[in-house]
Image (spheres, rainbow, N blue to C red):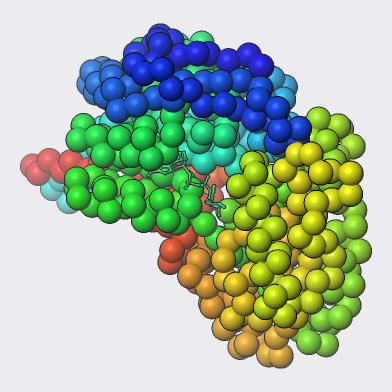
Amino acid sequence: MKHHDAMFIDGTWRPAAGAGTIEVVNPADERVIATVPAGTAKDVDAAVRAARAALPGWAATAPAERAARLSALRDQLAARTEEIARTITAELGATLGFSRRVQAALPVVITGSYAELAASYSFEERIGNSTVYHEPVGVVAAITPWNYPLHQVVNKIAPALAAGCTVVLKPAEDTPLTAQLFAECVDAAGVPAGVFNLVTGLGHVAGQALAEHPDVDLVSFTGSTAVGRKIGAIAGGGVKRVALELGGKSANVILPGADLAKAVQVNVADVMRNSGQSCNALTRMLVHRDQYEEAVALAAEAVGGYVAGDPQDDESRLGPVVNAKQRDRVRGYIERGVQEGARLVAGGPDAPEGRERGYYVRPTVFADVTTDMTIAQEEIFGPVVSILKYESEEEALRIANDSAYGLGGAVWAGDQETAVAFARRLDTGQVDINGGRFNPLAPFGGYKQSGVGRELGPHGLAEYLQTKSLQF
Ligand code: NAD
């Protein structure tokens, strides 16, 4: 596959300081499709220096000029959507349809939203006898995961550039090719040298060196809670700003009176998208005891429509998971669910029929799941739905909030008022009401251990700004 044997630093593709490489594997057939350099602390240092040198110039550009560069970046991403979608499918395993519709298309919308925000945002306000300036935080370290390889990058880089910050990106080991395409687009958009830099590498080497670098002002991380905790500690030690977008175990609460068939079907589709590798996936379905068996049957039927297949095939609705480690992890959780007494309604820990090669997992539904079970508490990150039973609204609320996480959620009810009243009592950052659609401008981020800070829209922009007050 097309790739660079280089890092993008200070506006040029240059060789890495060391000789280490990372193999990029297609999860559908386990073949190596490319190798990219494994950056070290030296590469990170060169990238941070370039970002620091470019900061005064970029921070001083008029917001309209930053908006123009972001518009050009949006156009670049839009023009290369098909290539980006195919690259994401090759290195992540997302079905091509999903890669086109969501993985490649959504970042175009989000980059466009930051082009508009850069032009319209009030970077200056008057409070009493003060003028308050909203200034860029400085040099940003962006560390991103593989599950949405472009979306997670754009969620950080677009607002950082809009704010006037400069950036060093360390993308996930599994999906560096998408990050390289993004760097090409930034370059073609006419963003000045040093404003955006890309260092590919291992998390505990390049990622850690970047988070620890004394000349980084803000670390923005998306990934596992375990690594997020480390990054938070590093940032605290260095008195740096930090944003953490971590895991989730989101509840879909179906109240009596809701359209049960629709609520179950939407829930199953939500967990199957991206092979279950979405941090806000509705992995816990809560159903009233009177409708419980009907919901279980509906879920089993719905999941039957997701047959694991080659993600390059237009007909496929479920691809593999990203790598062997994730496959084994997900299958381990399925085994654990069985051991702990949950009722396996569909799927199971074995490879799907005819899919022994590739990192495939059978789409799985568990019933009779209780909150004390591991599969009700831990983020599985695979195509696995757990269905829990409640007797009263109060119990449903207790179960929904009985989680270390609080990222997404959904409520279905016969009327909107009931659903909203319930949603207001959930300890979580987002709730979709009766199938409400994803809003790329609404703040996205977690309560509790799902993270610190918000991405998207004006709230996402504010993360990259700091205030200076002048008194008159
Ligand atoms: P991870 O947290 O290890 O990786 C995320 C990013 O952090 C990658 O770029 C990685 O290279 C980097 N990283 C790893 N160790 C680091 C360190 N010590 N210092 C700095 N950077 C470091 O995630 P993973 O191992 O790829 O996935 C494990 C689990 O994390 C998944 O099963 C899932 O539960 C969760 N996850 C959540 C999200 C999300 O969007 N919230 C995304 C991916 C994974």
What x and y, as percent, mark residue 123?
31, 36
Q: Nearer the viewer, residue 343 or 63?
A: 343
Rendered image quadrant of residue 24: top right
Q: Is residue 366 left or right of residue 401?
A: right
What residue is at 69 percent from the left and 45 percent from the top? Answer: 321
Rendered image quadrant of residue 137: top left
Q: Is residue 362 left or right of residue 116?
A: right
Q: Is residue 441 left or right of residue 467?
A: right
Indicate whether 309 appears above or below 225.
above
What x and y, as percent, mark residue 320?
74, 43
What x and y, as percent, mark residue 245?
46, 51
Which residue is at the far bottom? 391
Rendered image quadrant of residue 349: bottom right
Quadrant showing the C terminus: top left
Q: Nearer the viewer, residue 354 or 59?
A: 354
> Is residue 171 in view from this perspective?
yes
> Is residue 72 in view from this perspective?
no
Quadrant showing the N terminus: top right
What residue is at 48 percent from the left and 33 percent from the top? Answer: 171
Indicate whether 346 appears above or below 350.
below
What residue is at 47 percent from the left and 39 percent from the top? Answer: 144
What residue is at 34 percent from the left and 16 percent from the top? Answer: 17
What x and y, as percent, mark residue 323?
64, 41
Q: Is residue 88 left or right of residue 203?
A: right
Count of marks placed on residues: 0
Which residue is at the far left? 472
Indicate whether 234 appears above or below 52.
below
